[in-house]
Image (cartoon, coloured by chain):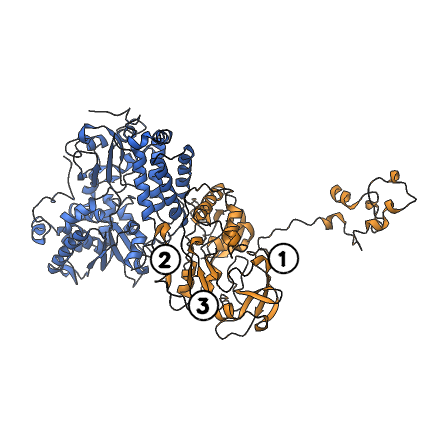
Chain colours: A orange, B blue
Amino acid sequence: MAEEQKIFKVTIDNITIDVPAGTTILNAARKIGGEVAPPAMCYYSKLKGSGGKCRTCLVEVVSGSTVDPRPMPKLVASCRTNVMDGMVVKNITSEKVIDVRKGVVEFLLINHPLDCPVCDQAGECHLQDLTYSHGAEQTRYEFERRTFVREDIGDYIQLHMTRCILCYRCIYVADQLTNKRVHGILDRGDKSEISTYISKAIENDFSGNMIDVCPVGALTDRTFRFKNRVWFLKPVDAHRDCDKCHGQVTLWNRGDEVFRVTARKDEWGEVQTLSDGKPGWICNTCRFEKKHASDWVIEGPTKINRHSVISQGHYVGNVGMIMPPDPLDKVLFGRQPHLLLDIHDVSKVNQLEVHLSELEGPAVSNTFNGDPHASGHNVTDVKEGV
Amino acid sequence: MSKKILLEKANVENIQTMEVYRREGGYRSLEKALKMAPNDIVEEVKRSGLRGRGGAGFPTGLKWSFLAKPEGVERYLVCNADESEPGTFKDRYLMEFLPHLLIEGMIVSSFAVGSNVSYIYIRGEYEWVTDILDAAIDEARKAGFLGKNILGSGFDCEIYIHRGAGAYICGEETGLLESLEGKRGLPRIKPPFPAVKGLWDCPTVVNNVETIASVVSIINEGGDAYARIGVGKSTGTKLISACGNINKPGVYEIDMTISVEEFIYSDEYCGGIANGKKLKACVPGGSSVPILPASLLLTTAKGEKRLMNYESLSDGGFATGSMMGSGGFEVLDEDQCIVRHTLSLARFYHHESCGQCSPCREGTGWMEKILQKIEHGKGEMKDIDLLWDIQRKIEGNTICPLGEAAAWPVAAAIRHFRDEFEWHILNPKECLVRNYGLGKYAEALITS
């Protein structure tokens, strides 16, 4: 019988949560959700060995554990640091973390082109999100940016190395999903580039997944490039019988036209875990060749896609979207109005026998469930009064 | 004349050969060690107070005792001979002139940590040194000091030499292990530390050449005898590779009780500043440690004489002190330009950054570009603060210490020589034709 799993108590940004031993700080924070979860540009929970490189997920450990409560001297990469029992972590409550993260965003951006207006990733780009939430308004970099020549690697994928932030995710995809990796990092330092060995094409049934894992617009779908902007498209869940993969995808439609097919993403922008517990990577046939609505069985609108500007508001659970509190219930004192805004139908303004000077305020609804609270005030006044 | 332990026999003719080395008392420590229990050797090294000579100064005995010892799993000893820190060349000297000392230390250390296969990861540029070491290993094998059942003790050991391919980053211990495994030399994310998961996921000890060579005399003379040399926690002797504007550059063995002033000015060591110039600044421990102006180099902020040892060199923290580092002692005279010096270091770290994590990959290049600008008379005042901010955001936020190594020299140069940077910016034409000179850095200087 398996040994009973230890449960560790960890406090992140003053929120305490129980997680099994061996969980990373980042995954513990994701369980809490919302802004407590540090951003991650290189870590990908479905790719073994990923993470630790981009340094955006650095957090401050103010207390190592109950046994050894000393703080850790440096900020740690939350994606690669396991929690200890009684660990206290500061993410957005730490000024140091916010400051350093701003620096990391700046480093990531100094050589990233400002070509969002023509970039296919715009609207669902993790770097855009990160910059928006943690970046500075202006760059202090005044030198020429690093550029590379665009390269088509195979019929389906284009590599635009200039945009790459070297997260290494696509390399892990090639290592772990496909049976022969033909691309990797060449050179070192800020000259390093993702490349195939002597411009070899990447031909593999699952190579398209590296487009999905790319946090920026460095790897793009050649069958979709410049066809549309993601925010004009409606994501719908669909499936088909596929002999290579599970065939569960998200279609990006405009009208009846299928513009592109991607794997289903979860709230962290990662490929969703399927009901059988495996990551939902999809094959190239599903992704690139089935571009007709008739190829697919449509299930309905996609429920989650926090990382797209569209997503139709179908958020479920706590996905980091905090809606402002709705004051309506409060101002209605538990009443159930038939119609709230029927003011003009019954407004005294429209009643000829009432002189305007007799009116205390603007429009009033007498049929406002006949409640005395309402008379003499309009709805806005009531709201403010409460 | 301070006591020599490592380089005592360096001048003996043909000491590179087994015959002469044996005649001079070589491999005694091995014979002695094989009769001891491995744990006793670790204890002996602990008692000696020997600290890692690669730069960080971590106690060696303690490092060895941290080594995980799971049943049925190989353990490895790796000697880090990838000496690539600018200004440091002590290991090359040691390996070139006393190859058997390293091999002897390797076998003893392998026995102590239980490694049957040990590696020397040597810097690729040290091609001829590799040949010397190869010859020494062959001789040792013929003499029965390597191979199966060494001297009838039942202990097997093989040593292999692996040549690096010219990357500074492969001197970082986990980058070294990756490279040794045949992969790109990208430092690993720690934890796990090599003592738990190192080479091929087995527990591994990585030690510097000088550290391993020091083990020989610790075994011969005993840990306590070794601990009596030196002062405080800086026990034993240290090799210092002195270079720059001094009369006698070279590798010196010091016993860590002498003062910095004595080291620079006495005839036994550097022999003073060359060409009758004055001392301006010094990088006391290899290029990545903070540079110190002469005034802070010879005396600490408290007004005490600064000594050549771990504690005294780091006295005052980074605000007014530096570090012992790897022992690369670079001296700059009054004619040297600090901006140019900092630029050349920044260029080095930019070139050597592995590109794995973003602060180092992007930040080192950015710092170099700004320094280029200042050095060529195109700088602006805000660039100094920008440089400071960039180094601050690199330091401590990277996977491996290369980030710090790149940030510290820039930080220290701005901290101590800000007026020289400002002079460069205010005099864009003049800075192209002449150097700032001595400035106020040497005011407190004792000139003898």
> Looking at the image, is A218 positioned above or below residue B290?
below
Visible residue check, residue B288: no
State yes or no: discs 2 and 1 in contact (Cβ < 8 Å): no
**Mark found first going from the N terminus, 2 or 1:** 2
Query: Which chain's residue wears label 1?
Result: A
Visible residue check, residue B370: yes
Percent x, y for residue A26? 48, 53
Does residue A260 appear left or right of residue A357 in this picture? left
At label 3, the amino acid type is Phe
State yes or no: discs 1 and 3 in contact (Cβ < 8 Å): no
**Mark found first going from the N terminus, 1 or 3:** 3
Q: Quadrant of residue A73?
A: top left
Q: Which residue is mark 2?
A: A185
In this rendering, do the residues under marks 1 and 3 share a single chain? yes
For mark 3, give the secondary structure: loop
Question: Considering the image in quadrants, where does the C terminus of chain B appear?
Answer: top left
Q: Look at 83% across and 52% down and name the residue there.
A: A369
Q: Look at 28% across and 43% down and name the residue there.
A: B57
Percent x, y for residue A173? 43, 63
The residue carrying pointer 2 sits among few (fewer than 14), some (14 to 19) or many (20 or more) residues within 10 Å by Cα, namely some
At label 2, the amino acid type is Ile
The Cα–Cα distance between marks 1 and 3, rounded to whole angstroms, is 30 Å
Percent x, y for residue B159? 20, 58
Q: Which residue is mark 1?
A: A313
| Mark whose residue sits in front, 2 or 1 | 2
Query: Which chain's residue wears label 3?
Result: A
At label 1, the amino acid type is Gly
For mark 2, give the secondary structure: strand
Question: Considering the image in quadrants, where does the N terminus of chain B appear?
Answer: top left
Query: Which chain's residue wears label 2?
Result: A
For mark 1, give the secondary structure: helix
Q: Which residue is mark 3?
A: A206
